[in-house]
Amino acid sequence: MVCRVSIVFGNKDITLVSIYKSPNIKTNLNDWNNIVTQIPAPYLICGDFNAHSRVWGSHKNDQMGEQILKVIDDHSMVILNDGSPTRRVRPGEGKSAVDLSLSSSDIANKFYWHTYSDTLGSDHYPILISFNYTNISQGKICPKTKWNTKKADWNMYTNYIDNKFKITPTYTNTTHKYSFLVNCINESAQNSIPIYNTFVYDRRPSPPWWDPAVCHSEIRKRKEALAEYKRSSTIENYLKCKKIEAETKK
């Protein structure tokens, strides 16, 4: 599964790609080359590749890891991982780093990569990636534009899309077909649906459901259980950690 978006940092566009490869899915070099060649540079690729290699921190090498290494080398990509494990394993299992962060070589030196010490209730450690770009404005949060659907002219919306589809070009590329569909929907919405006035505020408000007296206490218990399991990776501490994680989520 691959998802791609373009992010604007000041006057610089960076392509961000999220990838998940199930361990049950078999791939080959052509599959990966087909994905990478469609990603415009500069780019950052992150995801759970379910591939092992000692190069990025796993305790072993496997066939999928060798396949990914070949693609990385062929496209001159840079591995941002620092060798830290990205997944909490069961007692007796070797170190696991199946989550990869890859970058095009032109911006690799601007990233700072590290894992968070708390799994936040998952069996994967969150990966934090900072981008060193000083021209980005800080401290302001701009909410996403929202359509005012209560005042939409749905007849105009429908007619616009119908008319566009009557003159649909013939596409052989699936990506071009998808782009045409998305553009039709967006153009129709812009012509027939007003938007709410946008605003900017200085800080992100606290969520109304957050209860410090309860949530902070439960999170502290989860962190303590995880730290105990890291110190002593016994089956007892593993089961205790899983139990407290479930309680924290609830």
Image (cartoon, rainbow, N blue to C red):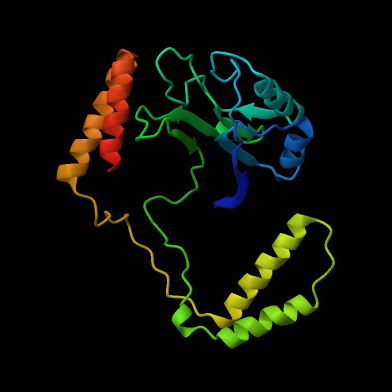
Which residue in the rendered view is the most extreme toward the left?
213
Which residue is at 77% across, 40% downward? 34
Is 152 drawn above or below residue 42 in the view shown? below
What quarter of the picture does the N terminus occupy? top right
- What is the x, y in percent for residue 136? 48, 49
Residue 181 rendering spot, x and y as whole percentages: 69, 67
The image quarter in which residue 236 lies: top left
Q: Position of residue 97 (x, y in %)?
A: 52, 23
Q: Is residue 91 left or right of residue 218?
A: right
Q: Is residue 64 visible?
A: yes
Question: Which quadrant does the C terminus fall into?
Answer: top left
Q: State the residue in front, 34 or 12.
A: 34
Residue at 73% over, 82% down: 163
Tell how many labels: 0
Pinpoint residue 186: horizontal percent, then vertical percent: 61, 71
User: In the image, is 174 to the left or to the right of 146?
Assistant: right
- 237 displayed left or right of 104: left
The residue located at (50%, 47%) in the rendering is: 135
In the depicted structure, whether residue 130 falls above or below residue 141: above
Q: Is residue 64 above or below residue 92?
A: below
Q: Does 118 sit above or below residue 173?
A: above
Q: Is residue 226 shown to the viewer in this render?
A: no
Question: Would residue 190 appear left or right of 181 to someone viewing this image?
Answer: left
State the residue in front, 69 or 8. Answer: 69
Residue at 62% over, 34% down: 103
State the image quarter where residue 70 is shown.
top right
